């Protein structure tokens, strides 16, 4: 009697083969194997739904002598190859027309499974499974005709939604080259990588008429022709290539865009291949220039955008605007703020891009704040205040600052100060002669340097790929460099910020007028208009008008009541009058203060006892410690000597704000002796009129740091984890960056687990994030006794250039990380959302006809100005009382959670309500803001990983 069928064990079916080998000891290579029932193939990591293959009845039949051998794993394949090699012929599968073996009953062939199938022949009609198999065209060994592999069967309808992967392209009918087999992903084009299933716009919410700072661009061209330009013999000098090509303007025309290799023309040349000759001026050699048509691009094609942006740079120059950094400003009409030694240059930000609504120019107002004082003036003021440690203080305050040289309107970053050199020092000119800085500036710019003894500023430009071997250093003269931006002291000066805000905080109506003025200036300038008309481009006469949606108001849940937030999404009044959701009693805490602030400390403690009962928090009298001086060592010694295990909170009242003292306290309380801490400036609690409101906010913050929950929202999704990631970069020091990782641990998304990881320059951030995610899953399982079914990751600090990296490499790494913790069977559905807040898009609501205003919180725009290749939307989540509100750009780079766009947008908006440092909405989701606060604290003050004893509390608020 035949043996019962074997179920394949292991990924390649090796277990079944070994079991059969033990059962039938005598078996020669190449003999038929017992046929097994078709088991369900192992799940692939790229898929979230199980793949099901129907196999007739699903029951195996006894092995017959006439049956075709079922191929399973590497062993059987190698055996068949060995047997065929002995016979002197290549193995070939049975022909499709061959009669079925008895007992098969119309079943399809068993699937080929295993890791070693990459280089073997295809078997017609058999789906291929395994880690290394993509649906590549492979040539059968015995014939010259390639067989197209059968497509995988679709998952059952009842399966969970599939991840939004790029749709597989059809396999090639030609034999794949070795390079194509080893590096299949490298061959994918940009379009294939970005081909994804983008859902339609959402529908939830009330329609709102809006305007955006986008100007539609019209084109009357049918196509832009792209040509490849080659030189024979090869010409390395780019400027020489430009000259040789431009010698033939009678053929290519005077309207062109050339980057040294690719030529763009608004017209098509008579011949697809045009050959001309030029003479090299250096040696008189004849150079053959070959111009080959490679493509005819649509006017809104992505490859044309570079040309268009170059055109608009020329337009800005024709408007007599000067480029400073990336933007253009008007230095002829500066706004002088004499009382603060400043001036503001008005300007514009422009970028042309192809959006869902067509080709549009994104334009916004920009302001460049310049200080009239030079670097030399600042050095002299530092010298007068510091005395002996002048050079050290100078380096500390100036390195990292950005300066502007007015003789060429360029900005430079100060990397060092050369105290040994001065303007009389010499450098090697491009002619090879030695020239002093004094002579150079006199000859080149007609500038007389007044101070010959001043040191030189060192600036090291960022290396580009082509200049990787060059170590370029720029030397600048301090008296010719103007300081830009604002210092920390200026930002803390209310009068300075108020005077600047009068000119820089622009209302929606003022922005609309400025945009209309820009359009009018372009239309009225013949040269600017002609520069666009040559390429068939014309600006519309008004900003883009479209329709957005206003999401419903959210319900805020407290301990004893729930209420709906107002249209401004501000619920501070209700939160400070009602008991918080989960209060934590303050039973054992200590307060440190200087002797001169004793009165303020007592007033604060008295007010804490008054306001906390209404919040549902019981407060005991703290242990008071009066310090005789405000030295940092005194604070640290008192905390170390009196810190006991039962102490819940350490409150330090500083007489004056000092970064070094703050960092020392936080390092002690977050790393060495982990305990939640609160630092208060004495000036903050010095005003009796504001003491109550200030104390209420401090009490809420302390409750959150102790692990309490202040408020919650209705979250309809169950078994989910929400993660926030942000990165802190220390620009001045050029040291390692810090990534903050915060993950929710309960259903209400009110409790959070936090970790940090350090990233060295050039190191992959994912290395540390995988450890953070594994720790967060472990904590989630510890709290809920289950693992999350869906994980939503909101990632801040990612630019447009990194989107493909995150969508491809990082998402797959995160998926693998989850399986490492929960096993192969645990495959949570994952969504990764990039959060961008530094964008130039502005949205204006038209609540009253002809009157533009800031849109209310909850305004969603997910069409027209969104990207063609990404699933994205804009959300206005905060309310501002001055200037123009900035929306936040959400880009969903991966999503297999099955959520509709409406649900993803509602979840993002809900999360902006859950930041416990502000009783209202913030600009980004709460986990992103928490991650930002954590990364900033660690990168600015602690410089070490915080203690894991504090990881389940919001100690970093």
Image (spheres, grey):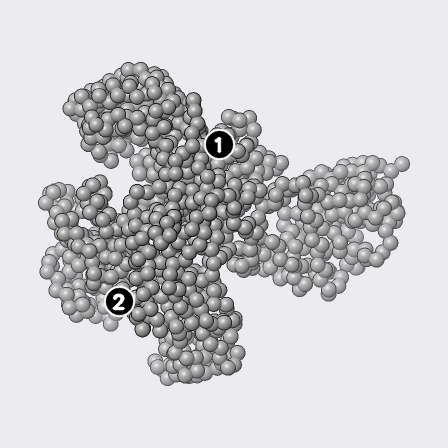
Horizontally, is 285 left or right of 69 in the view? left
Horizontally, is 443 left or right of 352 in the view? left
Instruction: Please give the name of the residue rendered at 88% of the width and 47% of the height, measured from the top-left corner.
Output: 102
Which quarter of the figure has residue 306?
Answer: bottom left
Instruction: Please give the name of the residue rendered at 23% of the width and 43% of the height, measured from the top-left corner.
Output: 491
Q: Secondary structure at mark 1?
A: loop
Pinpoint residue 204: horizontal percent, then vertical percent.
51, 43
Horizontally, is 571 left or right of 424 in the view? right
Mark 2 crowd level (few <14, some 14–19, many ≥20, 10 Å Cα): some
Disc 1: which residue = 714
The CA distance from mark 2 to mark 1 is: 55 Å
Instruction: Please give the name of the residue rendered at 68% of the width and 63% of the height, measured from the top-left corner.
Output: 173
Pinpoint residue 281: horizontal percent, then vertical percent.
35, 81
Pinpoint residue 587: horizontal percent, then vertical percent.
34, 16
Q: Secondary structure at mark 2?
A: loop
Pinpoint residue 631: horizontal percent, then vertical percent.
19, 28
Q: Does residue 795 appear anywhere in the picture?
A: no
Disc 2: which residue = 320
Which quarter of the rendering shows the C terminus?
A: top left
Looking at marks 2 and 1 on the same chain, the residue that comes earlier in the sequence is marked by: 2
């Amino acid at each position: 009697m035949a043996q019962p069928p074997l179920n394949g064990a292991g990924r390649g079916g090796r277990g079944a083969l070994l079991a059969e080998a033990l059962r039938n000891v005598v078996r020669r290579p190449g003999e038929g194997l017992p046929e097994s029932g078709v088991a369900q193939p192992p799940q692939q990591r790229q898929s979230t739904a199980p793949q099901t293959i129907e196999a007739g009845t699903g029951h195996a039949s006894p092995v017959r002598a006439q049956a075709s051998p079922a191929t399973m794993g590497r062993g059987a394949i190698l055996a068949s190859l060995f047997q065929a090699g002995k016979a002197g012929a290549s193995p070939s599968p049975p022909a499709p027309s061959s009669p079925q073996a008895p007992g098969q009953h119309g079943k399809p062939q068993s699937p080929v499974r295993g890791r070693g199938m990459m280089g073997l022949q295809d078997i017609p009609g058999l789906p291929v499974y395994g880690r290394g198999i993509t649906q590549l065209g492979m040539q059968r060994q015995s014939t010259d005709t390639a067989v197209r592999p059968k497509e995988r069967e679709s998952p059952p309808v009842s399966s969970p939604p599939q991840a939004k992967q790029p749709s597989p392209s059809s396999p090639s009918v030609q034999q794949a080259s070795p390079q194509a087999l080893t590096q299949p992903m490298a061959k994918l084009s940009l379009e294939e990588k970005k081909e994804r299933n983008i859902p339609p716009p959402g529908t939830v919410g009330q329609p709102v008429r809006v305007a955006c700072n986008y100007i539609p661009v019209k084109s009357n061209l049918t196509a832009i022709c792209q040509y490849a330009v080659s030189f024979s013999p090869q010409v390395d000098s780019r400027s020489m290539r430009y000259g040789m090509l431009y010698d033939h303007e009678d053929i290519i025309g005077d309207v062109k865009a050339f980057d040294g290799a690719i030529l763009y023309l608004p017209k098509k040349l008579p011949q697809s291949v045009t050959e001309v000759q030029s003479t090299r001026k250096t040696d008189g050699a004849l150079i053959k220039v070959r111009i080959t048509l490679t493509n005819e691009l649509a006017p809104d094609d992505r490859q044309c955008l570079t040309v268009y942006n170059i055109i608009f740079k020329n337009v800005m120059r024709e408007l007599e605007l000067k480029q400073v950094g990336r933007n253009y400003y008007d230095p002829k009409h500066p706004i002088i703020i004499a009382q603060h030694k400043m001036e503001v240059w008005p300007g514009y930000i422009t970028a042309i891009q192809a959006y869902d609504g067509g080709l549009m120019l994104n334009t916004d107002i920009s302001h460049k704040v310049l200080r009239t004082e030079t670097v030399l003036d600042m050095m002299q003021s530092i010298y007068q205040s510091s005395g002996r440690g002048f050079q050290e203080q100078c380096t500390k305050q100036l390195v990292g600052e950005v300066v502007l040289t007015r003789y060429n309107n360029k900005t430079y970053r100060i990397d060092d100060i050369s105290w040994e050199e001065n303007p009389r020092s010499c450098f090697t000119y491009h002619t090879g002669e030695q020239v002093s800085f004094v002579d150079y500036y006199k000859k080149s710019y007609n500038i007389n340097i007044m101070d010959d003894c001043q040191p030189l500023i060192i600036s090291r430009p960022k290396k580009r790929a082509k200049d990787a071997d060059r170590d370029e250093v720029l030397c600048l003269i301090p008296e010719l460099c103007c300081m830009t931006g604002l210092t920390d002291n200026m930002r803390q000066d209310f009068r300075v910020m108020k005077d600047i805000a009068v000119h820089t905080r622009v209302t929606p109506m003022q922005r609309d007028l400025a945009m209309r003025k820009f359009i009018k200036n372009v239309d009225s300038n013949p040269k600017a208009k002609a520069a666009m008309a040559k390429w068939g481009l014309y600006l519309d006469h008004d900003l883009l008008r479209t329709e957005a949606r206003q999401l419903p108001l959210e319900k805020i849940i407290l301990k004893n009541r729930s209420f709906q937030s107002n249209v401004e999404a501000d619920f501070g009044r209700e939160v400070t009058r009602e008991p918080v959701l989960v209060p934590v009693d303050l039973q054992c805490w200590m307060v440190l203060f200087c002797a001169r602030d004793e009165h303020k400390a007592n007033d604060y403690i008295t007010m804490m006892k008054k306001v906390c009962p209404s919040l549902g928090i019981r407060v005991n009298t703290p242990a008071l410690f009066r310090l005789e001086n405000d030295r940092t060592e005194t604070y640290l010694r008192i905390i170390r000597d009196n810190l006991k295990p039962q102490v819940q909170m350490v409150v330090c009242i500083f007489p004056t704000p000092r970064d070094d003292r703050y960092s020392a306290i936080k390092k002690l309380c977050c790393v060495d002796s982990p305990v939640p801490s609160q630092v208060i400036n004495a000036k903050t609690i010095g005003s009796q009129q504001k003491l109550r409101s200030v104390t209420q906010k401090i009490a809420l913050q302390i409750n959150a740091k102790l692990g309490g929950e202040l408020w919650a929202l209705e979250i309809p999704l169950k078994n989910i984890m929400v993660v926030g990631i942000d990165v802190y970069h220390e620009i001045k020091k050029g040291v390692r960056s810090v990534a903050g990782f915060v993950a929710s641990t309960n259903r209400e998304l009110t409790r959070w687990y936090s970790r940090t990881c350090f990233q060295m320059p050039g190191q992959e951030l994912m290395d540390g994030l995988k450890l953070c995610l594994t720790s967060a899953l472990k904590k989630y399982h510890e709290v809920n006794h289950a693992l999350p079914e869906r994980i939503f990751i909101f990632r801040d600090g990612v630019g447009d250039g990194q989107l493909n990296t995150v969508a491809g490499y990082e998402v797959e790494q995160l998926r693998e990380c989850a399986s490492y913790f929960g096993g192969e069977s645990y495959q949570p559905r994952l969504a990764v959302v990039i959060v961008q807040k530094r964008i130039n898009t502005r949205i204006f609501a038209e609540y009253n006809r002809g009157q533009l205003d800031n849109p209310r919180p909850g305004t969603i725009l997910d069409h027209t100005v969104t990207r063609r290749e990404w699933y994205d939307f804009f959300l206005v989540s905060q309310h501002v009382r001055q200037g123009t509100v900035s929306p936040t750009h959400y880009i969903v780079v991966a999503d297999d959670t099955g959520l509709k766009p409406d649900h993803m947008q509602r979840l993002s908006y809900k999360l902006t309500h859950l930041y416990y440092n502000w009783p209202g909405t913030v600009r980004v989701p709460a986990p992103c803001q928490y991650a930002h606060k954590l990364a900033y604290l660690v990168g600015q003050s602690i410089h070490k990983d915080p203690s894991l004893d504090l990881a389940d509390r919001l100690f970093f608020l």
